[in-house]
Image (cartoon, rainbow, N blue to C red):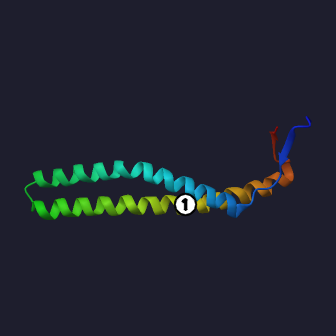
Amino acid sequence: MNANTKTLKRIDPFQLGKMLGALYSILGMIFMPLIFVISAMGAMAANQGGHSPAFGAGLGAGLGIGFGLMMVVAYGVMGFVGGIIAACLYNFLAKFVGGIQVEVE
């Protein structure tokens, strides 16, 4: 083993959860405009259907905005929980396998 090689034996589950929660929230914010565009297209399609245009457009736009905002929070929570689970699994397996070797300078 090289002098610059270190073995990662343990990951703090809470730290990885915070990091992945923040990362997944950012990913949710990146995808949020796409949800807004799709909901706007659905609202415009509701205007073409012959139903009450105000009801269809308002409902479609409102649900799209609500879903887009909820998606950011849900992604963050899923990233946090997934990070904690992944770190716990890594810590358990690292006892048997030996961990990941990383070269540092």
Indicate the quadrant where residue 14 lies. Answer: bottom right
Query: Residue at label 1?
Result: 78
Q: How many marks?
A: 1
Vertical position of residue 1 compared to residue 24: above or below: above
Counting from the top left corner in percent of width and height, residue 47 is at 12, 54
Q: Residue shown at 74%/60% (left/top)?
A: 12
Residue drawn at (19%, 63%), measured in percent from left and top?
58
Query: How far from the left and from the top, in percent, is residue 48?
Result: 11, 51
Q: Position of residue 91 (x, y in %)?
A: 78, 57
- The residue lying at 68 percent from left, 56 percent from top is 86
Q: Amino acid at mark 1?
A: Met
> Which element carries disc 1, helix, strand or loop?
helix
* Position of 52 relative to 37 (above/below): below
Q: Quadrant of residue 63?
A: bottom left
| Closer to the camera in the image, 23 or 93 | 23
Q: Position of residue 44 (x, y in %)?
A: 17, 51
Viewer-proximal residue among 92 and 72: 72
Q: Residues within 10 Å of mark 1 (few under 14, many from 20)?
A: some
Q: Residue furthest front?
A: 105
Q: Quadrant of the C terminus?
A: top right
